[in-house]
Amino acid sequence: MSDIFDFDQAERYAVMGNPINHSKSPQIHSTFAQQTNQKIEYTAIHVDVGGFNQAVSHFQAHGGKGLNVTVPFKLDAWRLSDSLSERAKRAGAVNTLVLKSDGSIEGDNTDGVGLVNDIMEHLGWPLTHQRVLILGAGGASRGVIGPILDQKPVSLFIANRTASKAVELANLFSDMNDQTNIQAGGYNALAGQQFDLIINATAASLQGEVPPLPENLLASPAYCYDMMYANKPTAFMLWAEQRGVQNISDGLGMLVGQAAESFYIWRGKKPQVSEVIQAIRQSI
């Protein structure tokens, strides 16, 4: 028997960004729809800078039901939303829009859930009671800190070239739970510390760069996760490999995971991510 999420006519969804031509989202969501027997149409839409609100309005007026939002429009989406999930409020950015039939717009952020699910469910790495280090204090970090703290690591250190940015970010989340010791500082403040899990949230490794990290930073065993992904290991992944780390991953599973959470918000169905990760891996 069909439930309320099953429709005879394909409903419209899309991802908006600039640039957008290399987006994997249409392939990901089409596979999710096949898995869960959902009839949807999902496209990638290039939006000119300054034209985001108009593009969303046009898409909604023509029957669009939901949108993924990527750079550089996540803040625009946050401002455009009539209501925000708690995690979107914390993240200060929106990557998922629900376009309601009454014309209102709900904003959510699935980046952090995508990361946490990839780490804990797909990779099977521990997060609770771990000492976690996040490299970078930009939007990528802010989008994932809340869901990481929900898993109650014993400590979370945010490191950034400009220490004040890291401290500012840590202060935004200092009230989230009293079981995690949240600290922040520059990369020089890492000397003498050890971490179980290091998450690279900087884009530097795609340019072949790694932040200036001290030696002896890694506990044993250690886990290293780069939120970026490419068709070869990133500079951060190579850094970890050179130091004997066995558990290393890029962020492709996060990409698929955040898409899966968006799909669930829109359709009420939880897709399987593992086979999609494998398929996307072969296409990059």
Image (cartoon, grey):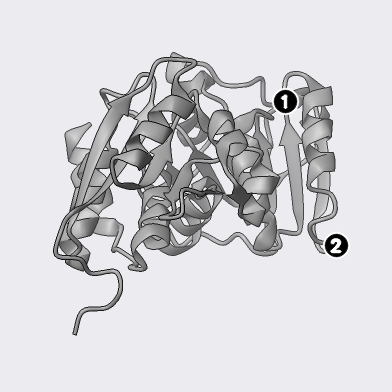
Which quadrant of the figure contains the C terminus?
A: top left
Q: Can residue 172 be seen in this view?
A: yes
- Residue found at x 59% / y 38%: 78
Mark 1 — residue? Answer: 160
For the residues labelled 1 and 2, the Cα–Cα distance comes to 23 Å
Q: Where is residue 278 in the image (x, y as percent from the top left)?
A: 22, 49
- Residue found at x 38% / y 62%: 264
The disc labelled 2 sits on which kind of residue? Asp
In the image, taking residue 51 as reference, residue 230 lies left or right, namely: left
Q: Can residue 197 be seen in this view?
A: no
- Residue found at x 61% / y 50%: 83
Viewer-nearest of labels 1 and 2? 2
Q: Is mark 1 on a helix, strand or loop?
A: loop
Q: Earlier in the sequence, mark 1 or mark 2?
A: 1
Q: Quarter-wise, where is residue 130 in the image?
A: bottom right
Picture layout, residue 76 above or below residue 218? above
Q: Where is residue 153 in the image (x, y as percent from the top left)?
A: 70, 59
Picture layout, residue 22 above or below residue 178? above
- Residue found at x 30% / y 74%: 4
Picture layout, residue 187 above or below residue 172? above
Mark 2 — residue? Answer: 178
The disc labelled 1 sits on which kind of residue? Asn
Q: What element carries label 2?
A: loop
In the image, taking residue 227 as reference, residue 62 lies left or right, namely: left
**Badge 1 local density, few (<14 within 10 Å), some, or many (20+)?**
many
Q: Position of residue 72 (x, y in %)?
A: 49, 23
* Residue closer to the observer: 58 or 264: 58
* Residue closer to the observer: 248 or 93: 93
Which quadrant of the figure contains the N terminus?
A: bottom left
The disc placed on residue 116 is: none
